[in-house]
Image (cartoon, rainbow, N blue to C red):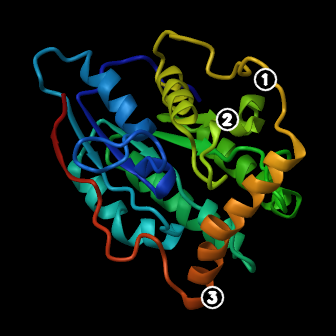
Amino acid sequence: MPATSRSYASYVAVGDSFTEGMCDDLLPDGHYRGWADRVASALAGEHPDGEFRYANLAVRGKLIGQIHDEQLAPAAAMGAELVTLAGGLNDVLRPGCDIDRVERLLGRCATDLRASGATVVLFTSTDPTRRMAGGARLLPTILRMKAFVQELGAREGIAVVDLFSAPCFDDRRLWAEDRLHLSPEGHRRVAEGVLEALGRPAAFDWRAPLPPVAPPGRAERLRADARWLGTHLGPWIGRRLTGRSSGDGRPPKRAELLPYS
């Protein structure tokens, strides 16, 4: 259910590359900004006293089991008033995904974080079928996850940002060149969706389609596909075959709940 509008003095973001902010604008410290930082910035603006605190424990490539084992306890211990939780899509992208286990662990994370006193925000996945090759294969599992997340969202203190039902995410301009992570415009829209779920008045319609543009020509599409295959898909497959992850050995970008301005 939508969260009742209230002031939040502390916020912890939990998840994988989606929440880490991959492919948004780079910050001076070399980290990506991301929608969670954008949400933190907006909430910090409601606290001119400088008392707002923010942590981002998300690390790219993490599976739901790793999010549960590595991020859940630290996030709950921080006692933040608000927690965003996104995870499970990396599992769904892998062949042989154990969706029962994904739902069990995601549900446990949401329940434990809610028990810590936090308002919890969850997300449905976007619909991959109209922009991603092979997306139809993933759709049944993504629809099952969507239904599960919406069931969790019916509980008091848990809100859901429904990205699946926002057709603007069919537009490739909301996605980075790797076709897996959001572009800066995509991050801006997700941040607005979170703020709306928290009861903030809309600054713009984050679901609205982008202005139409002429589609790329065949030669441009072929060049883009070849670049994607060599630069992004090939290395991704290589990591899967060798059991490696892009997040191996990478610490969270904001591991402590500290003042944010």
Q: Report x, y in % for residue 217.
A: 86, 40
- Choose between 95 and 73: the one closer to the eye: 95
Earlier sequence position, callout 2 versus callout 3: 2
168 in relation to 121, above or below = above
In the image, which is nearer the foreground, mark 2 or mark 3? 2
> Would you name the residue on which mark 1 appears?
213
Q: Report x, y in % for residue 71.
A: 35, 62
Q: Residues within 10 Å of mark 2 (few under 14, many from 20)?
A: some
Q: Residue at (48%, 30%) from the top-left corner?
A: 191
Residue 88 appears in which quarter of the rendering? bottom right
Q: Amino acid at mark 1?
A: Val
Q: Residue at (46%, 41%) from the top-left corner?
A: 24
Residue contact between numbered discs 2 and 1, judged by CB atoms under 8 Å? yes
In the picture, the disc for residue 241 is 3
Q: Secondary structure at mark 2?
A: helix
CA–CA distance between discs 3 and 1?
A: 38 Å
Q: Amino acid at mark 2?
A: Arg
Q: Is residue 213 left or right of residue 45?
A: right
Q: Report if residue 119 is visible in the image.
A: no
CA–CA distance between discs 2 and 3?
A: 30 Å
Q: Secondary structure at mark 3?
A: helix
In the picture, the disc for residue 237 is none
Q: Report x, y in % for residue 152.
A: 61, 45
Q: Quadrant of the C terminus?
A: top left
Q: Is residue 208 left or right of residue 222?
A: left
- Choose between 147 and 225: the one closer to the eye: 225
> Would you name the residue on which mark 2 appears?
173
Q: Residues within 10 Å of mark 3 (few under 14, many from 20)?
A: few
Q: Residue at (37%, 46%) from the top-left corner?
A: 32
Residue sitting at the far bottom: 242
